[in-house]
Image: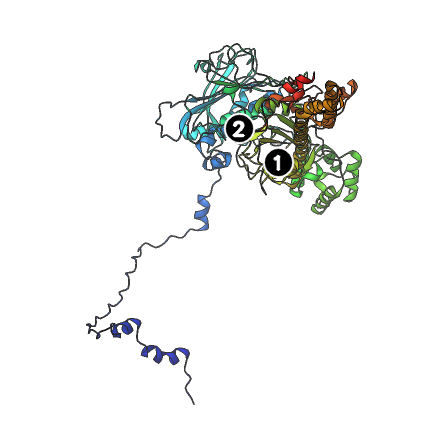
Amino acid sequence: MTATLSFPDLFEPMIAAKPRKSQQRSSKQPKGGRARAEPATPEPESVPAPAPARSSKPRVRATAESMAAQQRDISVSEFFAKNRHLLGFDNPRKALLTSVKEAVDNSLDACEEAGILPNLTVVIEDLQPDRPSTAKQSRYRVTVVDNGPGIVRRQVDNIFGRLLYGSKFHRLKMSRGQQGIGISAAGMYGLITTGKPMVIHTRPDAKKRAHHIELAMNTKTNRAEVTEDQETDDFPPQRLKTLSAGTRDEAFLNSGDYTTGTSVSIELEGRYQKGRGSVDEFLELVAIANPHAQIMFVPPTRVAAEDQEDLPLTDAAKDTPDEGKAPPAPDIVAKDKKIDATVSNIEKDGMIVFARGTDQLPPETQEIQPHPRGIELGLLIQMMKDFEAANKGGGTLYNFLQEKFCRVSSARASDFCKAIGVHSRTKVGDLEPAQIEALFKTMQETRLAPPPTDCLAPIGVRSMLSGLLKGVRAEFYAAETREPAIYRGRPFLVEAAIAYGGELPADDTARVIRYANRVPLIFQQSACSSFKACAETSWKNYNLTQPRGSIPIGPLIIMIHMASVWVPFTSESKEAIADYDEIRKEMKLALMVCGRKLGTYLRKRTAMKRQSDRRDVFERYIGEIAKAINSITGEPAKKLYDQLLKEARKRTAMADAQLDEEGRTMKKRMKDEADELRGDEGVVMVENRASQPAQESPAKKDAASPPTANGDVVKLSKPKRKSKKKPSKNDQELF
């Protein structure tokens, strides 16, 4: 029998016979000499590391009972107190802006629901003006006063002292607020950072005294703890009228304008800084989308200068007229009182006034019921349970379908009942799970009319143009409002507007202004569906420069507004719109309409300038030609000059063209045809803001006369004809 060797047994002699690398190196002789005899040093033996001392105490393992003893529920306020970054309070500068935003949104909603033209006053007081220059934040007191309907006393504790409490979450109706978190979260942030409670003044009845309440939120219970409650005549708070020279003016917080309303004051840790993402920018954008509101803003006396940058919109200090002088009006001849082109923002004595641009309130919205195509199976089951509980088990499926859904008529409700094999008198509680699932499938497959759109209140073309004229110094304005569309069974509407040229920077990337239910969206621009729609639109088709996969470059501002009964925000902070295909498609279509108008305008302006340059060349040599022909044929020089000038004007007739409200060349129209233009709300063009080419001489400035969107004439800059100037010396010799 032969012995079988394993793999280690075969190679063990070879490994033992092979010397180590250190032994091989020591045995080698140095170059040019004999090997030195070095004493062999024994290799130190490796000493194992001492093992860590183990605790003699035995480990106590958790049991199901011990783990159950540690489990408890948490309130929503306690959760958001630890995760306040989800609500927009992740840094001092953003926290200050979010607090102002939530208070302004609530004030505008309250005024519009009560049918009151909003008067808002925003005051930010710096409570640490003597802080060192190296301080990254300061303590501020934010106060927002409105002239709305006020708040009844019994609801103050719930509105300002509880999260997820409000009237807007369960209703399908357009509003700025949705979740019932905003203003109470701002008070919670102020309490966490400063320990100070909110101070509320509210007067729901002009004939009664106002309520003065100070309260703080208990984050453990999500309830308000009132520390002061009394009646007072101090509304609006007179303390605010002593802050600066501008606040001492009689028009500031005039008691006649604030007979009812609410005032909210919050002390918090923040950082006030001008530029992008600032309170100034937010209020300016609010004024553009809400031209029916008048906003007075009193900024703090000390401004953080780090990373400060100017806004590419209006400059209130620059646009403010001198004392005793009327504000400069853009060169627009408009009789339409819906747009006041002379309105501009004013800064005086440390106060900025965003003036009211129109006296027309947005249309009143109506609440609607859910659409059958916009619900899920679980929601349908819950709606049935709620309906059964409300009717104490006596509600029928026939009544449920008509009362709890829109666009479901009596005939359609009967068809749904027959489709699942029940009659119209079947109780909701008697349905089996399989029948409910069959009903849900039938509702999704049935073709129904889209939901009603009276629940939406769009800004409107005229209001958008009014807001842009007031806030953006450009030369060309265009706006478009799309027809309502549907996503997940919920109606929504998209509006877009652009402003081009004028004083806007020509070498910068276009500015994108995003709105959702009239509220500006300041942060998370790249994650928003509005920004993606701008990047996907082919602006090169409209004579603009656009890098691949980005927004265009040029003197352009793009404004996009989405109005919906429920805006799909990406987070609780409401900073970006979710990227639904239906929403992005409507945004792109609205931008395309505005882009076509701008492209037509730019092409016509280019053609007009080209023809004007041709005429300039003709007129330069007409005199010499007429003189030469006169010397050859003897024809009167003046007659030849007039005929050649007439022919030159005929060949370059484009230079005298007039552009209509769409930017198209306009032929001679009868008076009744011009009146038809008054009903078209398309474009506004401003002459004295039109940009001129860099190489164009100052003498080449004239004006064509296109009508505005309401049919009135607006001058459009183009090169001037030399025929209107005095004739040259050679031309004078002809006459």
Q: At which x and y percent is residue 691?
A: 59, 26
Of labels 2 and 1, earlier in sequence is 2
Q: Is residue 12 above or below residue 113?
A: below
Count of marks overlaid on the render:
2
Numbered disc 2: secondary structure: loop
Q: Residue 167: which numbered mark, if any?
A: none
Q: Is residue 449 left or right of residue 102?
A: right
Q: Which residue is mark 1?
A: 544
- Where residue 192 sits: x, y (%)? 42, 31
Residue 616 image position (x, y, % from top left): 66, 26
Number of residues whose C-alpha sits closer than 10 Å to that of mark 2, classed few (under 14), some (14–19) or many (20 or more): some
- 644 or 718: which is nearer to us? 644
| The quadrant where residue 104 appears | top right
Viewport quadrant of the C terminus: top right
- Give the SS element for disc 1: loop
Question: Can you name the residue that lies furthest to the bottom here?
Answer: 1
Looking at the image, which is closer to me, 655 or 276? Answer: 655
Say left or right for 626 vs 139: right
In the displayed structure, would residue 384 be above or below residue 341? below
Kind of residue at badge 2: Pro
Q: Residues within 10 Å of mark 1 (few under 14, many from 20)?
A: some
Q: Quadrant of residue 541?
A: top right
Say which residue label 2 marks: 312
Occupied quadrant, residue 391: top right
Q: Give the CA separation, mark 2 to mark 1.
A: 19 Å
Residue 74 in view of the camera: yes
Comparing labels 2 and 1, the label whose residue is closer to the camera: 1
Q: Amino acid at mark 1?
A: Leu
Residue 169 location in percent, x, y? Answer: 60, 32
Residue sitting nearer the eye, 651 or 425: 651
Q: Can I make out residue 105 in this image?
A: no
